[in-house]
Image (cartoon, rainbow, N blue to C red):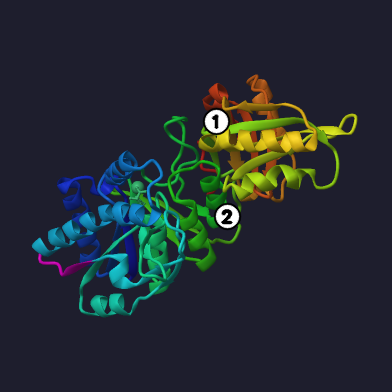
Amino acid sequence: MEKLLVQKFGGTSVADAGRIEVVADIIAKTISEGHKVVVVLSAMGEETDRLIDLAKSIQTEPNLREYDALVSTGEQISVALMAMVLGKRNLKAKSYTAYQLGIKTNKMHGRARIVDVKVEKLIKQLDKGVIPVITGFQGMNEEGDITTLGRGGSDTTGVAIAVALQADECQIYTDVDGVFTTDPRICPKARLLDQISFDEMLELSSTGAEVLQLRAVEYASKHDMPIRVLSSFSEGEGTLVEEKEDMERPVISGISSIDTEAKLTVRGVPDLPGVAAKILGPVSDAGIDVDVIVQNISADNTTDFTFTVDQTDASSAEEILKETSESLGGGSIEVDDNIAKVSVVGRGMRGQSGIASKMFQALADHEINILMITTSEIKISVVIQKDLMEKAVNALHDTFQLDKNLDT
Ligand code: ASP
Ligand code: MG
């Protein structure tokens, strides 16, 4: 059956001329199997990093309009080269920038959101047998200025184009074989998953798994567009991220970890209505994302309040917190960046009790002290000391037997 596929290739997949030829092989093979393909590319290798460094060497806080104009050029190079390589093989291919296609975004330079994708041009080209090769990561705002979608944003471009074209699947080619039960660099027993649901992938992506950009998963989930994550470096079916009815499933599907957050505590703030809002309001007004939040039960009408933020935001959050604490008559501020967060994620925990205590017991058995705990319907996260992260991930991987495929 003929399928319409969007194939997105990441930076490592197109890092040099040789790699572009390998990717062209993959595209050519898909075409020869009778499918229609739309290609979306990232910038070559570390090109985006290089462009960002260049911008910052001129101005530490570059003008955002010009920053986007600059960093979006990486993708323009890869699409033109790819169209040339495909053309050399007598495949009809044409490169397109987001501007040429009218991929509209909001005005948030540097982290814009796609609001509209026009597909008439693409459909015309596909009907003529042309392979469109599209720049990932970029769009245009109402003013016609170039915007970019945030780091890793080409994934989102791929998904948005697949949704607009009502493609059968959005294939995200990368340098790993797919989505694993946990990071194989941390846990040698990590196992490749053949399938995972959107809600599990969302939890994993938002708690440290780096394989897919979170926004891309959100977009795909909202529009029910299946994503297949697979490697351009080796053969294999990869992992299908899709909506699927719950069958017999393992309780835990994956474990994620992150060690780039810092924990801030303000001591002895009054235990009164409105205090949490007074503490976190100014932090969020400063554009700082807050992750885990814990407020203690009060003793003598005051309480300690702790939350985590990205390490890069820790010192600005500390400044803000100092002012808040002073105005509330609270106590001292403590900042600790020697932490990691480990999360276990699985739809199967919905109907089962005792998963949290099993997790905590496993950590206890390995003498890992828990500093903070937070849960959602399908996730339990703990904050622990940073140097225990690897030990915790491996212990939990063993405890929940993630090396075994209990799915079948
Ligand atoms: N080239 C951009 C980046 O490195 C977008 C992407 O690769 O998805 O973040
Ligand atoms: Mg990239």
Residue 28 location in percent, x, y? 19, 61
For residue 298, above or below residue 89: above
Q: Amino acid at mark 1?
A: Val
User: Is residue 233 visible from the viewing direction of this image?
Assistant: no
Closest to the observer, 298 or 33 = 298
Residue 173 location in percent, x, y? 33, 52
Residue 33 location in percent, x, y? 24, 66
For residue 386, above or below residue 318: above
Check disc 1 and report the residue beneath it.
393
Q: Amino acid at mark 2?
A: Asp
Residue visible at 46% across and 30% down in the picture = 186
Q: Could you say whether the residue bearing mark 2 is in a helix, strand or loop?
A: helix
Q: Could you say whether the residue bearing mark 1 is in a helix, strand or loop?
A: helix
Q: Residues within 10 Å of mark 2 (few under 14, many from 20)?
A: some
Apparent side of residue 385 relative to residue 272 in the rendered image (left or right) = left
Check disc 2 and report the residue beneath it.
199
- Magenta stretch bounds: 89-95
Residue visible at 80% across and 47% down in the picture = 274
